[in-house]
Image: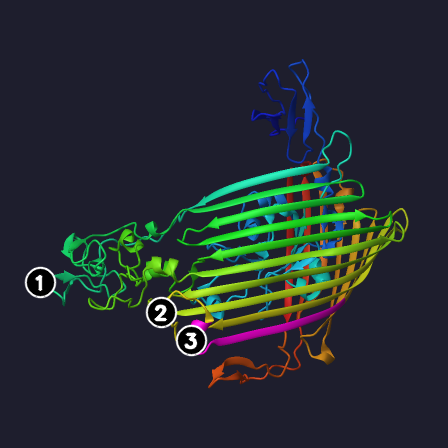
Amino acid sequence: MGIPGATILVVGTTIGTTTDIDGNFKIGVPTTTKQIQISGVGFMTRTVDLTASDQVNITLEPNIQQLNQVVVTALGVPREQKSLGYATQQVQGEDISLAKEGNFINSLQGRVAGVQISGSSNIGGSSRILLRGVRSISYENQPLFVVDGVPVNNGNFTTTDQVRGALGYDYGNAAQDINPDDIETINVLKGSSASALYGAQGANGVIIITTKKGKARTGAEKSPIGVSFTSGITFNNVFVLPEYQDTYGGGAGPDFIVSDLDPTQLRSNFEYDGSWGPKMEGQMVRQWDSYYPSMPNYGKLTPWTSNPDNIKNFYETGVTTNNNIAIDGGNELTKYRLSYTNFNEKGTIPNSSLNRNIFSFNGSNKFTSKLSSSLSVNYVGANGKGRPQTGYNNLSSNFTQWWQRQLDMDQLKDYKNPDGSQRTWNMNSETDLTPLYWDNPYWVAYENYQTDQRNRIYGAVGLKYDFTTKLSLSGAIRTDYYSDNRQERVAKGGASTSEYKEQNIFFNENNYELKLDYKTSINSDLDFTAFIGANRQDRKTENNTYKTQGGLNAPDYYNLTNSVGNILATPVKSQLRRNSIFASASFGYKHFLYLDVTGRNDWSSTLPTDNNSYFYPSVTTSFIFSEFVKAKWLSLGKLRLGWANTAIDPPPYAAAETRPTVSSNFAGYASAIIPNAANNSELKPEQTSSFEIGTELIFLEGRLSLDFTYYNSYLQM
């Protein structure tokens, strides 16, 4: 039987073709050609040497790996996907790195069923991801990210105003620090049945990321090291803007205003921040740029005409470059991989940029036939500048809601007078040229800008000792640490009170894990795998905010000591500890029937000390019915069933009776505010009971597949 649609490529060239419906093909090859490569969906790729004959018969082997795919499951345990009693989906790293996204989460869009991703078009903006929708009404709903066993924080640490849609900056979610060029595979554990072993952290599902590792290189024909280099460049332009009217210019009525400086002249209504004024028919009037002595149109009347592209002309062409170099090598005992990535993004908003440098190292070593070790270290250094504000009254909403259609961006670009004061289209009056409601958009971009610096280290060190081929003991220490420093400026001489603000965020989470694994065949029909372990999680967070009050004394000097009034300090610190034990038992009968039982118990410091224990059980089973259906068209048929109970503990100090918050100084003395409402000292974890049933079908040796799941979750407060 021929294979239709297979791809044939002449090795070393771009010459290629595909097979017809009967699996036949014709292709012209250069005389120097020695090999052709053949690939097809569901089949192993094959390279064939050419002979003097003009005909060649080729047989492709089915891609058995696709049918018996091994995936990484909870706590880093590799399992055959067909044995799992819950829904999981794997994405290859090359599919993620190909897009060269600044936030790799966006690259998962459309690749995983049941996943909702809300991205941001802002430079370095947040991407929010949900697995199977919203589960909690009180706490976080995003999944846990795990990189080579390390739980990676995905916090945002944004302001309340930014969350509710008021003016603020989007500094992005912390998981965007994960480098897509280092990703080997991503396995998405969608439901509670799949993620119950992660406890409270995995209550919303888990995204397990396995990074690329070094490979053993032996033999005289192979290089001792491998080197790879990838580079990408992307250009971004604002593609869609609202449809604006270009009939009426600035103002609120059909008439111009008589100038107070010269009653014989008419002027525009530059005080009004809207465009429902006189029709733009080329009338000669005095406009905003005629009042600044240093501007070319000073004292002149200019035509009252529209500028249809004035908003489009503000945006620039964004450029993103991504370069990665990696070396790997090793032998049968030692393997390593070292990678460096430089990511640079210039935004479409003037003066906006983001730079990220990422170093990663993965290594492993076998000291003896029984003792081995592993080490992973990742460093991320990111610097942002001029991120655009989000929410109401940001630049985009200014253009759409509070703007005038006759304004010329070329005139606004030169936004400063020789004395450093601002030139704005929205002035107080003919004699008071300071901003009334709105700053010049270029003043906002180049004077009211922010900066931020994030330095992050995450990784793990582990040891494993094999007592026998069946029994092993492993231990690991995993850490995630970062500092995120942010500076926000409101320049003196603008429409708003000048201000300088610093926000310093520190996050550190350490996990200490010990696990005992056992694997055996009870008899020729029954396989048994089990493990038991313990974990301690310690998390410390600081979020300290300091800002000036009453304005700045001197312009262009951004320092807290430049505050007119007392500095407002808002320090916030929190600590969390979870102690956990967990266990799992898996049975496999004749490779067609599987049963998994897991359990985990957490003791959380955020709950009352006399009631801080809660348990997560799960039971799953899978039945491979294709073992009993003798049909060539059905490669794999599986039914699966799962149930689990998960819980989320409250944030730190939510169970304490009161938690005073620091307020601004009063008469030079520190002060704090006690909340009006007391917390619930008998707080319990938020629990969810989940049930799912599904099927996986693979047809025609992997050419067509179907994965269907029905699930139901019940939340108990």
Q: Determine the image quadrant of residue 415.
A: bottom left
Three-letter amino acid code at disc 1?
Answer: Thr
First in residue order: circle 3 vs circle 2: 2
- 307 sits to left or right of 600: left
The picture places residue 382, in percent across and down from the top left corner, at: 55, 55
Residue in front for this viewpoint, 623 or 69 = 69
Indicate whether 98 appears above or below 167: above
Residue 187 on the magenta segment: no
Q: Earlier in the sequence, mark 1 or mark 3?
A: 1
Residue tagged 3 = 549
Q: Is residue 380 visible?
A: yes
Q: Which residue is mark 1?
A: 264
Q: Which residue in the protein does label 2 denote?
A: 496
Q: Position of residue 583 (x, y in %)?
A: 80, 62
Range of magenta residues: 561-580
- Residue at mark 1 to residue at mark 3: CA–CA distance: 45 Å
Horizontal relation, residue 174 to residue 317: left or right: right
Quadrant containing the N terminus in the rendered view = top right
Q: For this rendering, which residue is in front, 551 or 465?
A: 551
Q: Quadrant of residue 599?
A: bottom right
Measured as percent of width and height from the top left, residue 377 is found at 68, 53
Q: CA distance from mark 3 to mark 2?
A: 12 Å
Q: Residues within 10 Å of mark 2 (few under 14, many from 20)?
A: some
Q: Main secondary structure of the magenta part?
A: strand
